[in-house]
Image: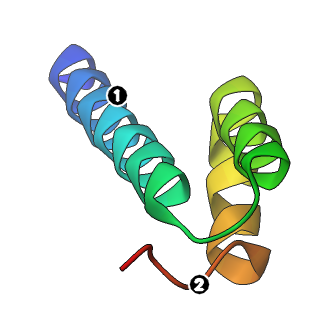
Amino acid sequence: MMTKTGGLLGFIHLVLVVWAVINIVQSRNSNGSKVLWTVLVIMVPVVGILLWLLFGPRGRAG
């Protein structure tokens, strides 16, 4: 049972990281900002995603 739960949580985590990176790349911010946010989200995933949701880029490229 624990393995299935861990696998499901890992999958959800992976989906959130991919979603965050895609949204970061599509944002209107500078390339430097995009790189920094992407590195943060990938290197420190849980904290990075939370920080990005709170303080990250808001708009998307049109």
Query: Left of 3 or right of it: where is 51?
Result: right
57 in relation to 48, above or below: below
**Residue at the (64%, 29%) spot, across then down:** 42
Q: Position of residue 58 (x, y in %)?
A: 59, 84
Numbered circle sitting on residue 21: none
Q: Which residue is mark 2?
A: 58
Q: Is residue 46 left or right of residue 19?
A: right
Tell me which numbered mark, 2 or 1, is placed earlier along the sequence: 1
Binning the other alpha carbons within 10 Å of mark 2 as few (below 14), some (14 to 19) or many (20 upward) gives few
Amino acid at the residue labelled 1: Gly
What residue do we see at 62% from left, 73% from top?
A: 53
3D distance between C-alphas at marks 2 and 1? 26 Å
Q: Which residue of the protein is positioned furthest toward the front in this rendering?
A: 62
The image shows residue 55 at horizontal and vertical percentages of 78, 78
- Label 1, secondary structure: give it: helix
Residue lying farthest to the top in this orientation: 3
Q: Position of residue 25 (x, y in %)?
A: 50, 50
Q: Which residue is mark 1?
A: 10
Tell me the mark number nearer the camera, choosing from 2 and 1.
2
Q: In the depicted view, which residue is nearer to us: 48 or 12?
A: 48
| Residue at 62% over, 55% down | 49
Estimate the x, y position of residue 3 in percent, counting from the top left. Answer: 24, 15
Q: Label 2's element?
A: loop
The quarter of the picture where residue 62 lies is: bottom left
51 up-or-down from 4: above or below: below
Crowd rating for badge 1 (residues with CA inside 10 Å; few <14, some 14–19, many 20+): few
Q: Nearer the viewer, residue 47 or 5?
A: 47
